[in-house]
Image (cartoon, rainbow, N blue to C red):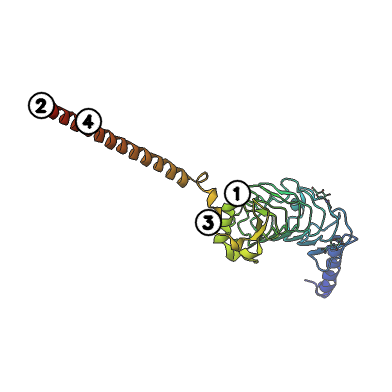
């Protein structure tokens, strides 16, 4: 190699890196503190800015007025690891937006205006570790398969939403879950809640506020009670119509009642029969005595 090329190398490196950084243009209203971070926090944005470098890994869009993200968002920014959309105006997510196999580890959708988490929302997001969806006051519907596929998820925040009920099936496919926030929802302690209550009792170590931090309202008078004051017994009225065991008990007790009735009527019949024979016998004796 020619010696002057060796001598030029540092300059070439400097020039090419400057060109590269300029190629990765930073959106005009945002800051790009390092090569992989775009910080558009609190810029009054109403939509996701264009010209975000495609290889962005940390994208901070919190405290804006963003109402919509396109369904191919994570396809486009497939290197995204950290996405902060906290405190925006999202009211729905296009189906499929978050269901691509992505590298996303952290997703904050807290303090938005979401109403529903439909089944399949997160599809195959196997990398996701922390999902924040609290403070969406109208969020009252969670699909049965909303969180399936989130096999790495450790933290799930659903606090201060509008949830009145939640099927435990929603929580069951989360093998890595360590922290679950459900406080501040208008839970109803009805029979639907009984199963969730049983699940929470078993998993109370995952609740940062414990059972005492979660309240539900009583169907009779609407009074709020912390879950720590309730027990399985509080939901005993709900049994009998619900479980298979209860059906079996009903059926078997039905059978044993019938068996008892048969035995009793048999016993009664034979007693009557006995008396009849006895009285016949004594009549015969009388007749014989009269002769
Ligand atoms: C949410 O974002 C708006 C707009 O930037 C801001 O005025 C407000 O203080 C933020 N709220 C919180 C709780 O950060
Ligand atoms: C949030 O959603 C509710 C009900 O869907 C709607 O009435 C309200 O206007 C929305 N608020 C904002 C700030 O978009």
Decide which of tag 2 and tag 3 comes sooner along the chain. Answer: 3
Q: Quadrant of residue 284?
A: top left
- Residue 160, position as x, y percentages in the image: 73, 58
- Disc 3 versus disc 1: nearer the observer: 3
Mark 2–mark 4 CB contact (< 8 Å): no
- Disc 2 versus disc 4: nearer the observer: 2
Describe residue 75's horizontal placement relative to residue 20 as left or right. Answer: left
Label 3 packing within 10 angstroms: few (<14), some (14-19), many (20+): few
Q: CA distance from mark 3 to mark 1?
A: 15 Å
Decide which of tag 2 and tag 4 comes sooner along the chain. Answer: 4
Label 2 packing within 10 angstroms: few (<14), some (14-19), many (20+): few
- Disc 2 versus disc 3: nearer the observer: 2
Describe residue 247's horizontal placement relative to residue 214 as left or right. Answer: left
The residue sitting at 80% across, 65% down in the picture is 37
- Residue 55, position as x, y percentages in the image: 77, 59
Mark 2–mark 3 CB contact (< 8 Å): no
Q: Which mark is residue 233?
A: 3
Q: CA distance from mark 2 to mark 4?
A: 18 Å
Q: CA distance from mark 1 to mark 4?
A: 58 Å
Residue lying at the far top of the rendered structure: 291
The residue sitting at 18% across, 28% down in the picture is 280
Q: Can you identify the residue that label 1 sits on?
A: 192
Q: Quadrant of the C terminus?
A: top left
Confirm or reject: label 1 Cβ below 8 Å from ligand 2. no
Q: CA distance from mark 3 to mark 4?
A: 53 Å
Decide which of tag 1 and tag 4 comes sooner along the chain. Answer: 1
Q: Which mark is residue 276?
A: 4
Q: Can you identify the residue that label 2 sits on?
A: 288
Decide which of tag 2 and tag 1 comes sooner along the chain. Answer: 1
The residue closer to the viewer here, 91 or 260, is 260
């Amino acid at each position: 190699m020619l010696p002057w090329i060796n001598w030029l190398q540092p300059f070439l490196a400097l020039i090419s890196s400057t060109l590269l950084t300029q190629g990765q243009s930073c959106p005009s209203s945002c800051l790009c503190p390092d090569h992989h971070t775009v910080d558009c926090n609190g810029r009054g944005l109403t939509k996701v800015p264009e010209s975000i470098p495609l290889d962005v890994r940390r994208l901070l869009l919190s405290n804006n007025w963003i109402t919509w993200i396109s369904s191919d968002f994570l396809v486009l920014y497939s290197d995204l690891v950290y996405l902060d959309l906290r405190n925006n105006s999202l009211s729905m997510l296009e189906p499929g937006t978050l269901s691509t196999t992505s590298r996303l580890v952290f997703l904050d959708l807290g303090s938005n205006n979401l109403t529903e988490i439909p089944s399949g929302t997160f599809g195959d997001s196997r990398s996701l570790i922390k999902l924040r969806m609290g403070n969406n006051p109208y969020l009252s519907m969670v699909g049965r398969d909303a969180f399936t596929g989130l096999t790495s998820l450790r933290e799930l925040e659903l606090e201060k939403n509008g949830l009145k009920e939640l099927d435990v099936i929603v929580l069951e496919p989360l093998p890595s879950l360590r922290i679950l926030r459900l406080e501040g929802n208008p839970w109803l302690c009805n029979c639907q809640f009984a199963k969730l209550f049983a699940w929470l009792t078993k998993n109370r170590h995952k609740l940062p506020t414990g059972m005492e931090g979660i309240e539900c309202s009583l169907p009779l008078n609407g009074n709020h009670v912390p879950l720590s004051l309730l027990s399985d017994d509080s939901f005993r009225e709900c049994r009998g119509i619900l479980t298979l065991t209860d059906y079996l008990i009903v059926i078997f007790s039905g059978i044993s009642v019938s068996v008892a009735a048969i035995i009793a009527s048999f016993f009664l019949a034979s007693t009557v029969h006995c008396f009849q024979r006895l009285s016949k016998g004594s009549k015969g004796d009388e007749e014989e005595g009269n002769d």
